[in-house]
Amino acid sequence: MNNSPIKSTVKLISLSAISLALCACGSSSSSSESDAVSNVSNFPSVIIGQVSDVTNSAITINSHTVPASSAEVELDGNNASLSDIKVGMYVEVETNGTQATEIEYDPLLKGPVYIDGDTLSIAGITLNNAQNTNLGEGELLEVSGYSDSTNSITVTYQAAISNAQEELELLGNISNLNTQSGTFNLGNLLINYQQAEVEGALNNGQLVEVEGALNADTVIATEVDAEQNLNFNDDTQAELEGVITFVNNDETLITINSKWQVTVNDQTQFEDGTATNLITGQHVEVDAQWQQNNNQLLATNIEFESSNTEPTETSYTFSVSGQVSVSGNTATINSNNFTLTNQTRYEDGLTAQTLNGQWLELEGTYNNEQTLVSEVEIEDNTSTLDLKGNVTLNENNQAEIWGYVSEDSTLSQFVDQYVGLECQWVNANQVRACALGD
């Protein structure tokens, strides 16, 4: 597609708040449905979301019924027709304001299923709402859906893959990178990238998309994309719908579906809520403008949907301040390591090369394996620290959060809890007067 995000962008988009019944066939068409298409002349240039209806002349996405009888259709990289688009698929629709000009669908995941009791996963990503009838361990599955945390998605469309040589499409955060052997892991899958075309730098924690074929228990990659670049034209108007998976402390940066970072400012308008309703798990519809100079999507309007999800046990947002030491793509505070990734946003004129030795605030998401930094900014006030995360007992039986311990034992009341706290900094890794934040 011209003037659209790279192909891989579509695979990561996860954009609807509604759990639909999984369906292997599109809606039936009729002339009355065709006549019902409203005469709209102000569709956004790009609409990305879940298909809720499709006829022989129109597609319904994000509550828009868009005339599409003359649109070019691409399905997983191949030319297709409108009848190949199914309810539940996530698609990218380009319009000229009055009708669709191009429609593109790419699966979010295509890979072998791992089954643990009633839980299904692909490459370490849990598949919520997936139908597991007649699915066997290791069988190949195509999935479309939306990310609701850093390691799970809600499935809205699935289809079995019968061809064992089918090219796989995977995504996730790198772990166990071994540059000598040319391998890394995505969840429980071993990826061999020795012969792959690699875009961007590979580091543990980096979000990547992988294409390749399964050979025994290893995926032989042909392409690995770690760049995650957007390729919108300047001032492109886009509409996104999905789940908030990260919000920074001052509510000026949100991440949709663990992928799309969206800036919020004083000019952003809100429907059915305010900036205080920007919380993880909240479903939103975002109208945004791509600003090439700032390399950002700026939200012009955010509409809050009615249903929410709660953060899962293994996926939280975090906030921590302190003096940072940096080695490679790892930032360290109080012996806790935080991974700088291709999605990290640097504020206050900072770059990855200027962080070492500075007093900074890091915010992001973490799960059982990795702590991923979404935003870095200079911490001007070191007397009061905002600390968000799990309070645990250390080896000395002291309550601590991100390596900070309280000299007055005010952290003790929060042991084994996930909390957002305000603490007074004393010195080194000592704090006091810790209390729940606003």
Image: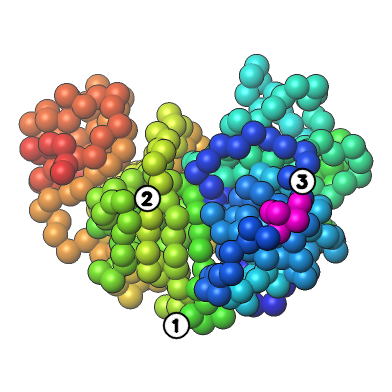
Q: Amino acid at mark 1?
A: Asn
- Please name the predominant secondary structure of the magenta segment in the image: helix
Disc 1 secondary structure class: loop
Q: Circle 3 sits on which residue?
A: 28
Q: Residue shown at 33%/46% (left/top)?
A: 279
Q: Are marks 2 and 3 in contact (CB under 8 Å)?
A: no
Q: CA distance from mark 2 to mark 3?
A: 31 Å
Q: Residue shown at 56%/59% (left/top)?
A: 64
Q: Circle 2 sits on which residue?
A: 304
Q: Earlier in the sequence, mark 2 or mark 1?
A: 1
Coloration mode: rainbow
Disc 3 secondary structure class: loop
In this view of the protein, which residue sits in the foreground, 191 or 39? 39
Q: Nearer the viewer, mark 2 or mark 1?
A: 2
Q: Residue shown at 51%/82% (left/top)?
A: 234
Q: Quarter-wise, where is residue 281 in the image?
A: top left
- Quarter that holds the N terminus: bottom right
Q: Quarter-wise, where is residue 308 in the image?
A: top left
Q: Position of residue 248 (x, y in %)?
A: 32, 54
Label 3 packing within 10 angstroms: few (<14), some (14-19), many (20+): few
In this view of the protein, which residue sits in the foreground, 364 or 370? 364
Magenta residues? 30-34
